[in-house]
Image (cartoon, rainbow, N blue to C red):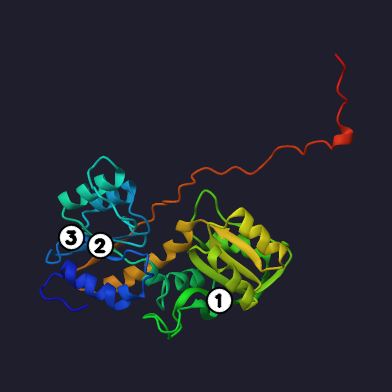
Amino acid sequence: MSTTAAVPTVADVVAELERRYPPTWAEEWDRVGLVLGDPRAPVRRVLCVVDVVPETVAEALDAGADMIIAHHPLLLRGVSSVAPTTYKGRIIHQLIKADVALHVAHTNADVAVPGVSDALAARLGLVDLRPLQPSRPGTPAAGQGRGAGRIGRLPQPLTLAELTRRAAAVLPKTAVGVRAAGDPNRSVRTLAVCGGAGDSFLADAVAAGVDAYLTSDLRHHPAGEHLAGDGPALLDATHWATERPWLDDLAEVLRAAPGVETLVSDLDTDPWTVHAASTAADEPAADDKEPAREG
C-alpha cells in the first residue's frame, strides 16, 4: 500500500481496497466504495465487519478505530433523510461525530479471487477451485477465475452427515449452526459453496454436477423443488457465518500497510440468537386416537 505520509490516509486505504476489489466488479444494483469519511484523514486502526449494525459500530468506537470496512452496505437503497430517528441515521451521525470512515466491499469482493467464497472454501479444505457461476463475458470482472461461489473437491469423501458436522465445526459459531437436506449417507466428494444468500445459484450447482452445495438463507420451496428434482444435497449455514471467514483475508491485505492496526469483529450479527431442537413426541396416528365421546 503506497502512502503519501507516515500514516496512511483514508484515501490510501480505499486505493488499496479498490485495487483488490474494483468497484466496477460490483453488480449494478450494489452500493460499494467509500460511504463516509474525509479521504485526507489519517487511518491508524481499522475494524473489519460483515454488518454495519449498532453493535459493530459500538465495537469500532470502543476500539478507537478510524475506519470501518464492511461487507454489507449500510445504505443499499436510496434514502431521503439520514436523521437520527432510525438506526441507520443514528449510525451515520455516530460515525461522522467520531471521525470514523466507512467503506464497503460487497459483490465486488464476492467475485474476486481470492474473495468471499474462496475463504469459505478454505475453511472446508476444498481444493481445485473454480467459480460456481463465472462472471459474464464482457463484464469488467470477467476472466481469471472470477465469479460467484466456488466449486471444489474435498480431500476425501464424506457422507452428508459427516460433512454437516465438519461444516458446523469449522465455520464461526452461531446459535443456529448448520442444517442439511438430503440422504445423510450420501457420499460427497465435490462441493459447491457460496458465501451469503445463494439459492439463486441452485441451477448452477445442478449443472455443475456437484454432490452437495453449501450456502445460506435457503428457502423452503426452492430447496424442496431442488431436492425433488434430484439436485445436489444442500447445507444451509447462517449468512454471517459463511461470510465472516473472508474478514481474515481482508485483514491480511490491510496489515501490509505500515502503521495500520487491523482488527476483525467476531460479533455474531446473525439475527437468530436461540435454537432448540424439536423434542415433541410424535402425534398418534388417526386410527390410534381415542374416539370422540358423544355429549
Q: Residue drawn at (25%, 46%), measured in percent from left and top?
A: 89
Type of amino acid at the residue the image marks with label 3? Gly
- Sequence-first tag of 3 and 2: 3
- Considering the image in quadrants, where does the N terminus appear? bottom left
Q: Which of pointers 1 and 2 indicates the residue nearer the eye?
A: 1
Type of amino acid at the residue the image marks with label 1? Ile
* Residue picked out by circle 3: 37
- Sequence-first tag of 1 and 2: 2
- Considering the image in quadrants, where does the C terminus appear? top right
| Separation of residues labelled 1 and 2 (CA atoms) | 32 Å
Picture quadrant of residue 264: bottom left
Q: Position of residue 43 (x, y in %)?
A: 17, 64
* Residue picked out by circle 2: 46
* Residue picked out by circle 1: 151
For residue 238, above or below residue 111: above
Q: Which of pointers 3 and 2 indicates the residue nearer the eye?
A: 3
Classed neighbour count for the residue bearing mark 2: other residues with Cα under 10 Å, few (<14), some (14–19), many (≥20): many
Q: Residue drawn at (23%, 42%), measured in percent from left and top?
A: 84
Picture quadrant of residue 158: bottom right
| Separation of residues labelled 3 and 2 (CA atoms) | 13 Å
- Outermost residue to the bottom: 144
Classed neighbour count for the residue bearing mark 1: other residues with Cα under 10 Å, few (<14), some (14–19), many (≥20): many
Type of amino acid at the residue the image marks with label 2? Val
Q: Nearer the viewer, residue 197 or 175?
A: 197
| Separation of residues labelled 3 and 1 (CA atoms) | 37 Å
For the residues bearing labels 3 and 1, Cβ distance under 8 angstroms: no
Q: Position of residue 63 (x, y in %)?
A: 24, 53
Element type at marker 2?
A: strand
| Left or right: residue 244 compared with residue 92 | right
Q: Residue drawn at (18%, 72%), measured in percent from left and top?
A: 12
Picture quadrant of residue 187: bottom right
